[in-house]
Image (cartoon, grey):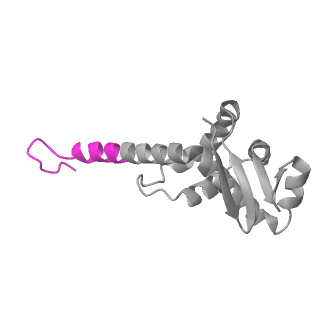
């Protein structure tokens, strides 16, 4: 079910709707490609979504960022004096220009969080658990059957 959230970001009001499944797959593929090197750095349970999103966005290509911005913009409306204004490419270029880049970053975080937060928290937790399990297996191989260290 595609849910819509209303939010305020830097005094701007938005309505952000979940992406269509086909668009989510396009975005998710790009996010995962950028997140793969970062996933192993996480500790698992205490994922800071804002920091994770910032790291993922920093690892993306300009083309990826343009594609993701456009896909999220298609499902976002800015609320201005009660009117819902679609985020067209020309409008987003003006809205997010100059000092608006910080607005863009917060908007991207909110869009990613709305569409994928649960997925990334689960992924980071699973990777953290897998890393700990491998580390535990490695330390077990350094002990003999009596529990004495062999290394």
Residue 130 quadrant: top left
Q: Residue at x 63, y 45 (%)?
A: 34
Q: Could you tell whether 83 is left or right of 150 in the image?
A: right
Q: Residue furthest top?
A: 22
What is the total number of numbered labels drawn onto the structure image? Answer: 0
Q: Nearer the viewer, residue 141 or 38?
A: 38
Q: Is residue 80 visible?
A: yes
Spot occupied by residue 68 in the image (x, y as percentages of width and height): 74, 44
Residue 95 quadrant: bottom right
| Range shown magenta | 132-151
Q: Residue at x 26, y 48 (%)?
A: 139
In the rendered view, tell whether residue 65 sits above or below residue 94.
Answer: above
In the rendered view, tell whether residue 83 sits above or below residue 66.
Answer: below
Name the quarter where the N terminus is drawn.
top right
Q: Residue at x 56, y 43 (%)?
A: 36
Q: Is residue 72 magenta?
A: no
Spot occupied by residue 70 in the image (x, y as percentages of width and height): 80, 44
Q: Residue furthest front?
A: 82
Q: Residue furthest right?
A: 90
Spot occupied by residue 43 in the image (x, y as percentages of width and height): 42, 55
Spot occupied by residue 11 in the image (x, y as percentages of width and height): 73, 69
Q: Residue at x 79, y 42 (%)?
A: 74
Q: Could you tell whether 14 is left or right of 49 in the image?
A: right
Q: Nearer the viewer, residue 8 or 88?
A: 8
Q: Is residue 58 visible?
A: no
């Amino acid at each position: 079910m595609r849910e819509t959230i209303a939010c305020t970001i830097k005094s701007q009001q938005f309505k952000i709707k979940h992406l269509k499944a086909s668009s989510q797959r396009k975005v998710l593929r790009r996010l995962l490609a950028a997140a793969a090197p970062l996933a192993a750095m996480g500790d698992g349970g205490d994922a800071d979504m804002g920091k994770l999103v910032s790291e993922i966005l920093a690892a993306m290509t300009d083309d990826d960022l343009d594609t993701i911005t456009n896909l999220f913009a298609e499902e976002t409306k800015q609320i201005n004096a009660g009117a819902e204004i679609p985020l067209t490419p020309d409008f987003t270029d003006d809205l997010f220009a100059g000092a608006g880049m910080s607005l863009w970053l917060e908007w991207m975080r909110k869009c990613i969080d709305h569409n994928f937060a649960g997925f990334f928290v689960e992924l980071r937790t699973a990777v953290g658990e897998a890393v700990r399990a491998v580390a535990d297996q490695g330390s077990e191989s350094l002990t003999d059957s009596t529990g004495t260290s062999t290394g």
